[in-house]
Image: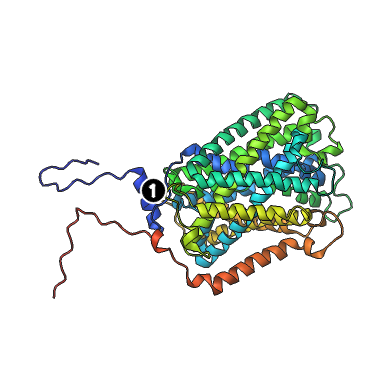
Amino acid sequence: MSTESGPGTGPAVPERTQGQQDDDALGELGYRPELKRTLGNFHTFAAGISYISILTGTFQLFYFGVSFGGPAYWWSWPMVFVGQLMVALCFCELAARYPVAGSIYNWAKKMGGPHVGWLGGWMMMTATMVTLSAVALAYQITLPQISDWFQFVGDGSGKNDAAANAVLLGTVLIVFSTAVNAFGVKLMARINSAGVFIELIAAVALIIFLAAHITRGPSSALTETNGLGSGQTLGYFGAFLTASLASAYVMYGFDTASSLGEESHNPGRNAPRAILRALIASFTIGAFILLFALLAVPDLQAEELSTGGLQYVVLETLGSTIGEIFLWAVVVAITVCVLAVQAAGIRLMFAMARDNNLPAGTHLAKVSPRFQTPVVPAVLIGIVGVVILVININQPQIFSVITSIAIIMIYVAYLLVTVPMLLKRLRRGWQPAEGQFSLGRWGLPINIVAVIWGLAMSINLAWPRAEVYNATGPQHWYLRWGAFLFIGIVALGGFAYYWFVQRHKTGVLAEHRFEEMVDPTTPPSPPAAP
């Protein structure tokens, strides 16, 4: 488009830059741009992949999968990937049309209305704060295996030594993450991207090193069930469903790539790509790490597989020196995972507060003029994360129950997006962004599968298994049914507060509301006729 004017052509019309177009798209949602657009393609990809954090998830949960499903639990990895891919594809269409902070909240609001949106945001925000604490605890699984020096509380043999030390290490990590996130998205993105780069290099190197130590073929490893499930009603299938939680606990959070949309360049185009790339890369790398670990471990029936997990495999197979190098890479992965989880939670809290959907919304939605990021949510989420950690000192079993429930709440929050989206499709009320990512005629079947998958996995995750929710005695009914009780309390209690108090105040706060700019070259409208 020409920017020059000639005789009789009138004033020139300036071209709209990509940043202005991105801000216009935000204005259509009713918000004025406040967050600085500094993130590129790799930054958004890194945010998604660091939230999933393959090294963190596989090293934290490998023992669980083997304990309940034997080596054959590996098949749950591709199963979960296919289900989550259906969800991610639905999210890609939404990210292309609504690349906005607090993506789950805003998508649920756009698809199902303000009440569904609030509930989806509330569930996701609560789960994110618990997830932050759960990921921070992973330091305890890795650092003391690198060196006894990291066992600051006791020598590790005391009843509460490990739990107390985990709280100490986790608190240090959350304080660091809070400071980085409060300082600004640019610093967070730089550290996160550098950490993801190290994680990806280490993951590929780990695959190569494990592949060089293979001692058996896939046919023997991936069919080994260790006799688990015998005597149960569903046989091995029941054991496999339990073991599949180890995969379900890892492969989520890919929506973070879109939650940073207001701070990204051309998010309508780049966010869908980042979501898919993060999920596909995580699945591929994780599949090979788990596969080659099972093929390389000297003894496939070793009891340490169910106690020491993947850390044991790495140290036993590669030796202490090389193994410790990879464990340091896991520490880096845990660190950037915490950064990404907290960053996503901050944007979610900011988005809900901007709509005056949280108490003290004005303060929570305030963007620091110096750091150009919501500082109060960063500090608040950090404080809540540390408080949740403290529960782990004397009640580790209760904390493990809450952690499991947090994952279910994320799956439920995803359902609060995909179910209303499916209803819109059935009513022909959904229209993807023109010229952006679209599923076309595949949209309806993919959306249906995404909803069925989300419902099935949520039920599987919440099923009152003693081995998951009450692993050590004495047995308590409230722990066995903890998923239904906790989620019910959080959902019903939170929604009751919203319904009777907050919904009467909801609406975009004036200081965040989009005000259409008037073109100074446009002549004023003539006065109305008397």
Q: Is residue 84 above or below residue 459?
A: above
Going by the image, does 86 lie left or right of 11?
right
35 lies above or below 205: below
Looking at the image, residue 500 sits to the left or right of residue 386; the answer is: left
Q: Can you give x and y, in whole percent of width and height, for residue 323 in the image?
A: 74, 29
Q: Nearer the viewer, residue 274 or 230?
A: 274
Residue 228 is left or right of residue 512, and the answer is right
Residue at left offset 71%, top offset 59%: 459
Q: Point out the residue furthest to the top here.
A: 212
Q: How is the image coloured?
A: rainbow
The image quarter in which residue 520 lies: bottom left
Percent of width and height locating residue 110: 48, 61
Residue positioned 71% across, 64% down in the render: 484
Q: Residue at x 15, y 68 (%)?
A: 527
Residue 283: x, y in percent? 64, 40
**Image coords of residue 338 (percent x, y):** 61, 45
Disc 1 residue type?
A: Asp
Quadrant in which the C terminus appears? bottom left
